[in-house]
Image: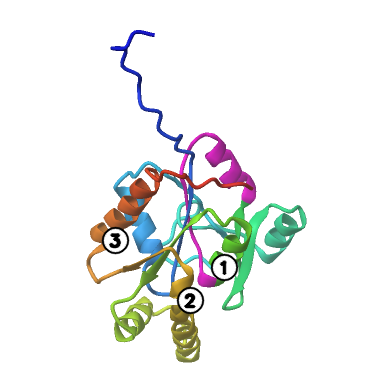
Amino acid sequence: MDEHTVLPIQLPERPAVLIVVSGPSGVGKDAAIKRMRDLRYPFYFLVTNTTRPKRSDEIEGVDYHFVTKEQFLEMQQRGEFLERAVVYGYDYGNSKREVKEALARGQDVIMRIDVQGAATIKRMVADAIFIFLLPPSMEILEARLRKRRTEPEDYLRLRLHAARLEMNEVDKFDYAIVNEDDALDETAELIYAIIRAEKYRVKPRRVNL
C-alpha cells in the first residue's frame, strides 16, 4: 500500500433504536408525539392498542387502535404484545411484531407509554432510550387534566395522586424534559436532538427482541 494512500475512518454502524417516551398522565405525551408526526420527523411512531373509549378529538389508527376488551384479550392470548398494562381500568398494549419489523427495516421506533409500561420495557430491552416528560409544576398538570373535561372529579383526583407517585420514577430514565405550556415544538426538537446524539455513540445501543 502506498504511504500516501488515504484510508477512510471506520465509524461504528448506527443500528435502529427504540425510544420510549413516558411520563404521568396529562404531561403531554400524546401531544408531543403528534407534533413530531406533524413536523415529519423520520421515525416509526408505534400506535398503541387500547380498550379506552375514543375521545372526540382522537383518530383511530393515529392516536390509538381502539379495540374491544374481547379483541384485546385475543391479541394477548396470541402473544402479540411487547408489553401490556392496565391503566385506570383500561388495557393498553403495544405490538411486538410492528417494533421488530420497523427496526429490521432500519427505522427508529418511538413508543409513548405510561410509566408502568416503560418499566416493563426497561426489563425487556435494556438498550432502549428512555425519555421522561415532566410538567412545569403539579398545578399546571392538574390544570391540563381539568381542561380535558373527560373525567369525573374522583377519577381526576386518582390521576393526580398517581402522577405524584410516577414523578418519583424519573431517576430510572435516561433523559428528562420539562414539557412547558405552548412549547410543543421545543419538546419535539429536544426529543429529536436526544435521538440524533444517541446515534453518534461510540458504543451504539443494540435492541434485541
User: Which of the two discs, 3 and 2, sits closer to the camera?
Assistant: 2
Is residue 47 depicted above or below 30 in this figure? above
**What percent of the width, then of the height, locates residue 34?**
36, 56
**What percent of the width, then of the height, locates residue 73?**
73, 62
In whole angstroms, how far apart are the C-alphas of marks 1 and 3? 22 Å
Observer-nearest residue: 206 or 69?
Answer: 206
Q: Given the image, on which type of amino acid does mark 3 rest?
A: Thr
Question: Would you name the residue on which mark 2 appears?
Answer: 169
On residue 187, which mark appears? 3
Left or right of residue 129, residue 187 in this image: left
User: Which of the two discs, 1 and 3, sits closer to the camera?
Assistant: 1
Tell whether label 2 touches label 3 (CB within 8 Å). Answer: no
Judged from this view, the residue extending furthest toward the front is: 3
Q: In the rendered structure, which segment of residues is drawn in magenta? A: 96-115
Q: Given the image, on which type of amino acid does mark 2 rest?
A: Glu
In whole angstroms, how far apart are the C-alphas of marks 1 and 2? 9 Å
**What percent of the width, then of the height, locates residue 51?**
60, 66
Kindly state the secondary structure of the residue where label 3 is placed: helix
Tell whether label 2 touches label 1 (CB within 8 Å). Answer: yes
x 34%, y 56%: residue: 191
> Does residue 108 belong to the magenta stretch?
yes
Tell whether label 3 touches label 1 (CB within 8 Å). Answer: no
Q: Which numbered disc, 1 or 3, marks the residue that appears first in the sequence? A: 1
Instruction: Mark 3: give few (<14), some (14-19) or many (20+) Cα within 10 Å.
Output: many
In whole angstroms, how far apart are the C-alphas of marks 3 and 2? 20 Å
Q: Which numbered disc, 1 or 2, marks the residue that appears first in the sequence? A: 1
Q: Given the image, on which type of amino acid does mark 1 rest?
A: Ala
On residue 119, which mark appears? 1
Observer-nearest residue: 96 or 30?
Answer: 96
Observer-nearest residue: 74 or 116?
Answer: 116
> Does residue 71 belong to the magenta stretch?
no
Judged from this view, the residue extending furthest toward the top is: 2
